[in-house]
Image (cartoon, rainbow, N blue to C red):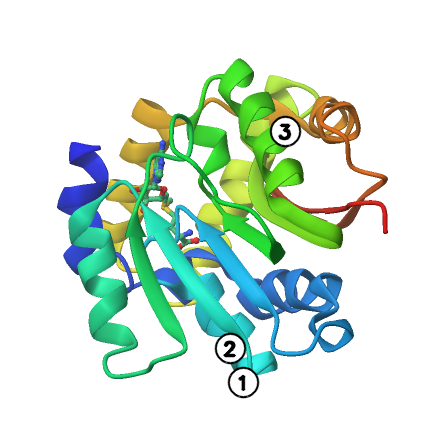
Amino acid sequence: MAGFDKAAATYDRSRHAMIPDYDDLYGAAVQALELGRAPSPSVLDLGAGTGGFSQEVINACPDCRVELSDLSVPMLEQAKARFAGDARFSYRELDIVTGDFGTGWDRIISSFVIHHLPHDAKREVFGNACAALKPDGIFVNIDQVQACSQAVQDIHMRLWRKDALAAGALEQDLADGIARMEAMDINADLDDQVLWLQRAGFDNVDVVYRNYFWAVFVASKAP
Ligand SMILES: C[S@@+](CC[C@H](N)C(=O)[O-])C[C@H]1O[C@@H](n2cnc3c(N)ncnc32)[C@H](O)[C@@H]1O
């Protein structure tokens, strides 16, 4: 966790540039949530960090109530500063591997978190997310995926670095991001994750967006 605690203060500085297709990626994720289908939907953000995904959700659906959870207190402090005084947000220090998600959520979201967990913990989180949702609830996970080969992974990495720098990412933030990737990432195959979501109990599972080494998974629970 020390890596995230340390990154918290500067995490948002190059965030949009570090994800050159930010609007398409988050746009696809928010659309997949179908927020208009539930009145005042309750949303749990797993590993919310500074609140980027929660921000997109509230922009799209101002009558949502969003709980931001994270293991890193400095990350949650950044999120609290971002949404200061806004009663639609609540905060919880939570380890998503060992902690309790509660129950009755309309939507559960997560972005760029679950690829940090060992594969068995990923499967555990998928199962717990399914159990914590209401019937007809939706889980949307934006995350990194492993390419089909190291050669393709290297191509994605080169393209991403070029596009991130062109979009204005600071060299320092790019270097820090890559160092965190090398130290902390345990990417899984896209197909494996679809299978794990199905086995976790979700009724419909799909990938609605894919670019570089990230993807948007949508998994809905039976009505
Ligand atoms: C790369 S950041 C992503 C933050 C945010 N979701 C975003 O998209 O900007 C990963 C986040 O996951 C959190 N995290 C990592 N492992 C966690 C765990 N086991 N339980 C809860 N949060 C965790 C970190 O503290 C960090 O805030």
Q: Residue furthest front?
A: 103
Kindly check if marks 2 and 1 are in contact, taking CB atoms under 8 A apart as contact. yes
- Mark 1 or mark 3: which comes first in sequence? 1
Q: Are marks 3 and 2 in contact (CB under 8 Å)?
A: no
Q: In what element is the residue under mark 2?
A: helix
The residue carrying mark 3 is: 127
- Left or right: residue 3 versus residue 153 is left
Q: Is residue 76 above or below residue 39?
A: above
Q: Residue at x 20, y 36 (%)?
A: 3
Circle 1/circle 3 CB separation < 8 Å: no
Look at the numbered disc 3 and give the secondary structure of its residue: helix
Marks 2/1: CA distance?
Answer: 5 Å
Ligand 1 sits in quadrant: top left
Residue 108: image location, x then y, percent: 58, 52
Can you say which quadrant of the picture contains the N terminus? Answer: top left
Q: Residues within 10 Å of mark 3 (few under 14, many from 20)?
A: some
Tally of marks: 3
Residue ID for mark 2: 58
- In-front residue for pair 89/169: 89
Q: Mark 3: which amino acid?
A: Gly
CA gap between label 3 and label 2 equals 26 Å
Residue displayed at 41% across by 77% down: 88
Q: Is residue 103 left or right of residue 172?
A: right
Question: Which comes sooner in the sequence, label 3 or label 2?
Answer: 2
Q: Which mark is residue 121?
A: none
The Cα–Cα distance between marks 1 and 3, rounded to whole angstroms, is 29 Å
Instruction: Tell me the amino acid under the disc marked 1.
Output: Pro
Nearer the observer, 168 or 5: 5
Q: Which residue is mark 1?
A: 62
Left or right, residue 214 beside residue 82? right
The image position of residue 157, as x and y in percent, is: 51, 37
